[in-house]
Amino acid sequence: MKKGNVIAGIILILVLVGILAVKDTESTAYIASNANDEIILHTGEVLSQSWLSEQKKIGGFVLQLANVPQTVESGSIKMELKDRESGEILVSEERVLAELQGSSLSFRFPVIKMKPVRELEVLLELNGDPNAEVVLKVNNDYSGCKINGEDKDCGLGSEFIYVKNSAVFVVMVSLGIIFALAISLSLLTKHEFADTSGVIAIGICLVLYICAMAGNASVGIYLIEGLAACGLIYILYCLFTNRCQVKNILSFGMAAVGIFFLFTIVYNYGTIITESDEFSHWALATKDLFYSDKLYSHEGTTVMFTRYPPLMSLFQYYFMSVNQLFSDKFLFIAYQLFGFLLLSVILRKRDGIKKKVVLSGVLFLFPLLFNTNYYNKIMIDGFLGILFAYVLYCFFFEEMDLFNLVRLIFGMSALVLTKEMGVVLAGLAGMVFLIYTVWEQRKLGTRKEWQIILTGIIALAVFGSWQIYCQMHIGNVTEKGMADAIQMISGGGHDVEDKLSFFLQTVLSNINSVWNGIKIGPFSVLTILVIFLFAAYSIKKRTDRKKEWVIMELLITGSVVYFLCIVFLYVTVFPIQDALTAASLDRYLFSYVSGIVFLIVAYIAAYGRKETEYIRIGILGLAVLFLAPTSGLFAMNQYEEKRQSILWGYDKIEENFQSFLNKDDAIFFWCDDSQKLSHYIFQYYMCPIHAQSGNTGCSFTYHEADEEKVSDISEIENIIGKYDYVYLANYSKKQEKYYGSLIGKGVLLDGGIYRVENTQNGVKLVLQGYSPIQRFY
């Protein structure tokens, strides 16, 4: 047993013990913040306050006291925490009234573990002194507070103390699990960390995918943690039995991933999402998955586009689960880390340290070549291009052994589970691989050809499993998918022909508009040109350069097929307004182009004369550094004003609804917002504290201030009569004369929360609370 291995093993064990020692930290969640009003609780009265919890562990309750002399001489105050659904008393604590000093009274109790979205109720009662009374703080804009069953139209000024994993624990464990699995796999397969880290990230998603389909994604987390524990044991076993050396474990790829992960933590500190598509799906899907523990294609989901594949949401869910609390920043951290884990496959041990340092910089900037805001958004197309590049690299740069076959199967399966456009990329990749293999082997029926066919069949089966799951759990859906497009074509009819004809006429007659929609900047074009020229120079110096030219010819031919597939989707699936303006065409095209360019970068790094290696790598690094739009890295500062305006009010409205809402209540969001941005933001922040049948989560209707376009009152009553609550945002005073008859008491308020009451005389709205938000026009 070598001394260095023993020391390394002991250090690893001590690190694990240290991580466990700093596991938990505490934070608070308000029932009603900014409580500046007062309510008096007398002996013999029972105060109750409802609360819909999002936390997984609760360990205390803090009651806010009014800043007035309290009338207490003896007796006690009893606090009980009850499950509203089952009636079970979870906590019962009592404090002597003489302890009522200062501005708060704390009740600490053993940590309670629970599932998120649990209906709780706090009960407070004075015992002993019949003349005792306590003045408590409340917020009259909230609700849910009752005394002896009588609603007091306020929310109790109080907060729960909840327990979550500490920041140090989250950082070490989330990355440590990936490291443990990747290192153990590298020792088992005799491959490098750079080879195994990407396939481990995909493997985590596939494990979670299977468990989430079964209705319990958290089981997948336990499986992953168990596998990581086994991986750690195996690493220690290898160290203590001299089956490996410390130098076999440590690698530049591992260091690069660790440094990049630390960068993402610092860079994304305080980050929130800002884009409409993120609110409507890419962030909302992960939030729904985290709180429901199921894939978002389930009954009562708040997600709108339930047929979008879930790969990235699953990886983000992994980070949220380690954190034990949903946080926007981990959406970005997971997204960026996943991409770097895949790209780092190019960092090989056989290369020199200087070369790998430059390549690490190239990998960091590479996504910016085709997606300026890659580090500021979680739109899936940029990641899809990286995943496609990973699959191409694994096939063309690695021998087809068992490990690489599994890696290709995982990569192709990941493509079809990332986005439906990934099915097209996977299909094209499979065709290119098969044609190239036939050309390379010079005959049909070889083992490698059957391996490619097997890879395609498994990827198709994985995609089919998602389609079957959607059909079983969604039923009637509003959004179209690729299956609908195929059905439209096979069903004949003139709609597709007419739409295609109209689309082509529009494209040809508005070619400038289409080009502007593509948004290919001169820097991107110049970068591609420079990289391609260097690749051509590198390939020319090889004796077997015909192989590389065949690969490029196949991929360029595939790009034509890919473009035709995009046109097909614009005609059959996408809305007509998207087809007419070529909306998002640049993102779709760059998913394919980035794969080709990454392959070219890999050729430049791997091939060419040894004496010119550092010159080639240096020029490549400078080309990417100066031509990539690095301004995207600093875009967060530009969005600060927008971020603050988006955040304003939405955290408080979520808190407000939590003070009285039942988890199955339905909310109607009433807002004059033709772009639906306010609706998407509201739906995101409210998830998961309300859920209802259907795909939209909370409904939306558009009303013009124009008197001729105002919706009929009977139409409004028919809609909101199906809901439990109405929230009014961006409400025009001019419309009050049309909808004033809905008011039970009070007035229509911009930012008002109303309880829906169905009476014999029609629908009435009763003011429940008030919480204004930022609106968008």
Image (cartoon, rainbow, N blue to C red):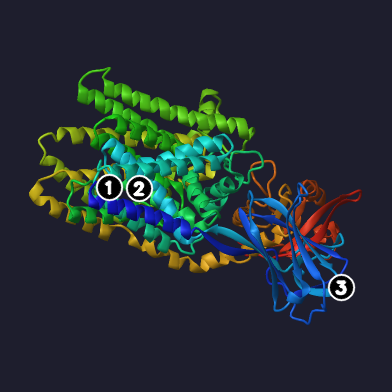
Q: Assign a secondary structure to mark 1.
A: helix
Is mark 3 in CB contact (under 8 Å) with mark 2? no
Q: Amino acid at mark 1?
A: Ile
**Disc 3 to disc 1, C-alpha distance:** 69 Å
Q: Quadrant of residue 710?
A: bottom right
| Residue in the picture at 21% in, 26% down | 440
Q: Nearer the viewer, residue 77 or 670?
A: 77
Of callouts 3 and 2, which one flags the residue occurring earlier in the amino acid sequence? 3
Q: Is residue 34 left or right of residue 417?
A: right
Front of the two marks 3 and 1:
3
Q: Which residue is mark 1?
A: 249
Q: Which residue is mark 3?
A: 129
Question: Which quadrant of the figure contains the C terminus?
Answer: bottom right
Question: What's the CA distance linking mark 3 and mark 2?
Answer: 65 Å
Q: Any mark on residue 341, and which?
A: 2
- Tell which tag, 3 or 2, sits nearer the viewer: 3
Q: Nearer the viewer, residue 748 or 285?
A: 285
Q: Is residue 151 depicted above or below 467 in this figure?
A: below
Image position of 24 with respect to 529: above or below: below
Q: Farthest residue to the right: give it.
A: 760
In this rendered view, identify the residue nearer to me: 527 or 206.
206
The earlier-in-sequence mark between 1 and 2 is 1
Give the image location of residue 72, x and y in percent. 82, 77
For disc 2, the neighbor class at 10 Å (few under 14, some 14 to 19, many from 20) is many
Above-or-below relation of 351 to 190 = below
The span from disc 1 to disc 2 (Cα, nearest Å) is 17 Å
**Quadrant hosting residue 394:** top left
Along the line of sight, which residue is nearer the eye, 731 or 409?
409
Q: Which mark is residue 518?
A: none
The total number of labels drawn is 3
In the image, 111: left or right of 489? Answer: right
